[in-house]
Image (spheres, rainbow, N blue to C red):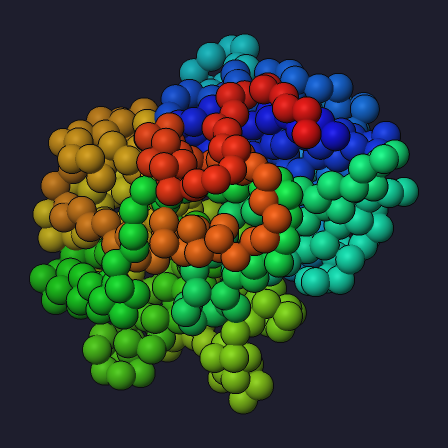
Amino acid sequence: MRLSFHGADRNVTGSCHLLEAAGKKILIDCGMLQGSRELDEENACPFGFDARSIDIVLLTHAHLDHCGRIPLLVKRGFKGEIIATSATVELARLVIADAAHLQDEEMQRRARKAPTPEPLLYSLIDATNAMGHFGRTAEYERPLQIAPGITATFYDAGHILGSASVLLEVQEPGAAQTILFSGDIGNAGRPLLRPPQTPKQAQWIVMETTYGDRLHRDFPDTVKEFIACVAETIQRGGNVVIPTFALERAQELLFFLRDAVERNLLPPQLPVYLDSPMAVSATEIFEHHPESYNANLAEFFRTKHDPFALPGLKMVRSRIDSMAINQINSGAVIMAGSGMVTGGRIRHHLRHNLDNPKSAVMFVGYAAPGTPARRIIDGAKHVRILGEDVAVRASVHTVNGFSAHADQSELLQWHAGIAGRKGTFLVHGEAGVMAEFAKHIQGERVEMPNPHQAFDL
């Protein structure tokens, strides 16, 4: 059994792991690289393997840094089957199509400045072709034979709707081995999804370490801070601009805004704009997948009480309606992607609000080094947005407790609950974070692989 890593380096997100076992080549995720530097060229580079040789792709969840290069994989010759949970399949359709659309918009913008812009990574046609490769759907805790001698079991990772950790049981001549791919591990005790499941045993673990060096703050305190920031900004006559991830984070924020309005903590007709076609569609998809709900959310849907509906909520799909939001100078909550401000409609809203000292910009998720979001968080006085130099005069708030990633304590608890470990491969984290997390793992082999590094197991 041979394991190789073809995703991001240690300061960039983007997952892509290749397992060669029982005569098959299985790719776990095929994500787009995002983070510390200009990555267009790196995303277009060779994968480090022949796309035509891959038999199966197992997709842990629908975030762009896990599924974003699947259309490129197909474009370069992949002919096999993609397996994921049903919720991930639905969400991946949105994410992949949105990525192709954003690339097309960016190319058109560049074409206005340069006669021969760089070609697209992939087109909407490529994205559509990729979706044709999704085959069998996985159900949580139900073993699925994906090839002779190889069984995959998906466990609820509690990260976003449909997210999974994937356990592979491999039977080769003279040996049987198990390897667990964590995907991204979520938090327990959140209002929407079930807590992450911990598989009982695995010999080898490929594990994310996004927050492997820190603890999240108490979640009720996080919610209080979020609502207080909104209330204070509205009261002083500004807008609240929230760069947000379309999957999970947007729905969670709507949940708490609705609750605050119902408890009279916010104005009853507070204008809230969810300016993201993908987030709007993702919110609608939630109702289709009760297998991922926790008991709290299930009760909302059972009683026909929409957990995300506010009296002043505007779901914005069209570009014209999005542009109209920029005429609003005060009193609104504006949520749009991308969460790291690397693209999407949020850039327009920041360009119109960042220089307003009455407004607030609130970051509610991870911001990779080098992204516009991280530069603003780190105290930049000016940022470059859509070709313009924009002064940062709005108040900037970072509310870390909303993260959909487990913190160090939860990661260690998840890891410790797995029996039979021989070794753990740490991925999906900054170099210093992984090194710190590695200190807490004793009595087994620990690796922090570099891109394209391979291991015989």
Residue 153 position by quadrant = bottom right
Going by the picture, which residue comes out furthest to the front? 443
Q: Nearer the viewer, residue 170 or 104?
A: 170
Q: Residue at x 18, y 47 (%)?
A: 396
The spot of residue 32 in percent (x, y) is 55, 32
Q: Is residue 349 visible?
A: no
Q: Nearer the viewer, residue 267 or 257?
A: 257
Write the residue at 56% across / 37% down.
Answer: 423
Residue sitting at x 43%, y 40%: 442
Tell me residue 167's x, y (percent).
68, 49
| Relative to 102, residue 242 above or below | below
Nearer to me, 232 or 422: 422
> How many badges with numbers are in the image?
0
Q: Is residue 65 left or right of residue 354?
A: right
Find residue 203 and report its horizontal and vertical position in percent: 64, 43
Query: Along the horizontal axis of the image, is 407 left or right of 165?
Result: left
The quarter of the rendered structure image containing the N terminus is top right
**Res. 337 in view:** yes
Q: Is residue 84 above or below residue 43?
A: below
Residue 47 placement, left or right of 263: right
Query: Is the residue 362 above or below the residue 119 in the image?
Result: below
Kindly identify the residue that appears in the image at 43 percent across and 27 percent down: 10
The C terminus, quarter of image: top right
Q: Quadrant of residue 284?
A: bottom right
Provide residue 235's location: percent of width, then percent of height. 12, 66
